[in-house]
Image: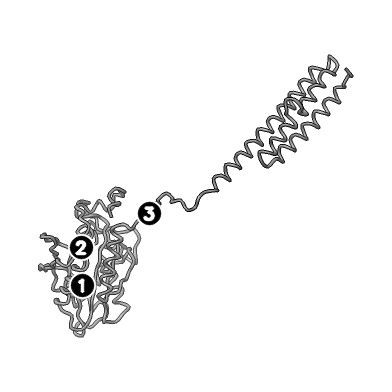
Amino acid sequence: MTSVPLDTFRAELERLRGDAESALTAATDAAALEAARIEFLGAKSGRLKSVQKSLGGLAPADKPDGGRHFNDAKNAITACFEVAQTRIATAATGRATTAIDVTLPTEPIRLGHLHPITRTIRRVQEIMGRLGFESVDGPEVEDQWHNFEALAIPAEHPARDPLDNFYLAVAQGNDPLLLRSQTSTVQIRVMENREPPLRIVSLGRVYRPDTADATHYPMFHQVEGLLVEPGTTMAHLKSVLRMFASSFLGGDVKVRFRPSFFPFTEPSVEVDMEWGGRWVEMGGAGMVDPAVLEAVGYDPDAVSGFAFGLGVERIAARRYGVDDIRDFYRNDARFLRQF
């Protein structure tokens, strides 16, 4: 056998390795890959097999180095083949995945829904809107004037006690600001900027440091209505509340008034609603105190008005049969999924 120099053998291996890597990298489908495999790694007529036969022509002293270079080239070509095989298989899988029948039904998508408190607020806005009341909004951080003084609540009144309000460290002038304790503040702000006649309803969060129980929470929602027109009476107030209750809770709801006291209404009443044979206290109401009308620049001899405030959580609990208003804020998906 003709003697083969080691350098010539190594050069032939490098050329073979380069050709194989180029061919395997260029293969784009299984047929091209198989053709490259046969050409370079074929057991009988592959080019690597032909170079292996040249090992016998090396000088005895060069054979160990020649065998090592041959194994390195074989391993490199084999690894390149496996990479190409994985690449083409992955591409084929991707094409098979995208080739789907778009007419088949899909997995159902779970959709969320509005929280029962949000649904209640929107329902109240809808009903009051049909009665001619405009929905208005205002800030939740209030000053002393809008939260107390304009509502005829003097400085010595117990409703202004620090234990009954969430006062803030920041102040306006010499008076600390606070989280509003009622949405009546919005009514004052609207009356300061508009002339009667006026029909508004304000809905939003209010804050009082109450101990949380089945019927109380330190943060809750109020709906407060205000109507100011010439000739307004308690009969108008009761008619509006009855129409609201029958629209929201059903036609069999009854409304009754019980005498009470609020600084910003005179006379004042507690509002109870009877539904399903049970009376439930829903909020307070009354005729707007003349002092409140004067505080915003209205003439109490020319116009009169009524105001009412209802707890949204209590309305929602009554509507949805919830016994504990804390359930609205526990973020229990099992509870919320019912609605």
> Gap between marks 3 and 2, in whole Å?
44 Å
Q: Would residue 154 be seen by someone viewing this image from the given angle?
A: no
**Element at label 3:** loop
Instruction: Quickly name the residue at label 1.
Output: 307
Colour setting? one colour
The quarter of the image holding the N terminus is top right
Q: Amino acid at mark 3?
A: Leu
Instruction: Quickly name the residue at label 3.
Output: 111
Front-lying residue, 108 or 301: 108
Locate residue 74, reporting x and y percent.
73, 26
Q: Is residue 295 above or below residue 11?
A: below
Looking at the image, residue 205 sits to the left or right of residue 302; the answer is right
Q: From the image, state whether disc 3 or disc 2 is nearer to you.
A: 3
Q: Is residue 157 above or below residue 27?
A: below
Which of marks 2 and 3 precedes in the sequence? 3
> Gap between marks 1 and 3, in whole Å?
39 Å
Which of marks 2 and 1 precedes in the sequence? 2
Instruction: Quickly name the residue at label 2.
Output: 159
Crowding at dot 1, Cα within 10 Å, few <14 / some 14-19 / many 20+, comes out as many
Tell me if label 3 and label 2 are in contact, CB under 8 Å.
Answer: no
Locate residue 184, reporting x and y percent.
25, 69
Locate residue 228, reporting x and y percent.
23, 79
The quarter of the image holding the C terminus is bottom left
On the image, which quarter does residue 192 sit in? bottom left
Q: Amino acid at mark 2?
A: Ala
**Element at label 1:** strand
Q: Residue at the location (19% across, 80% down)?
A: 304
> Gap between marks 1 and 2, in whole Å?
19 Å
Front-lying residue, 225 or 61: 61
Crowding at dot 3, Cα within 10 Å, few <14 / some 14-19 / many 20+, comes out as few
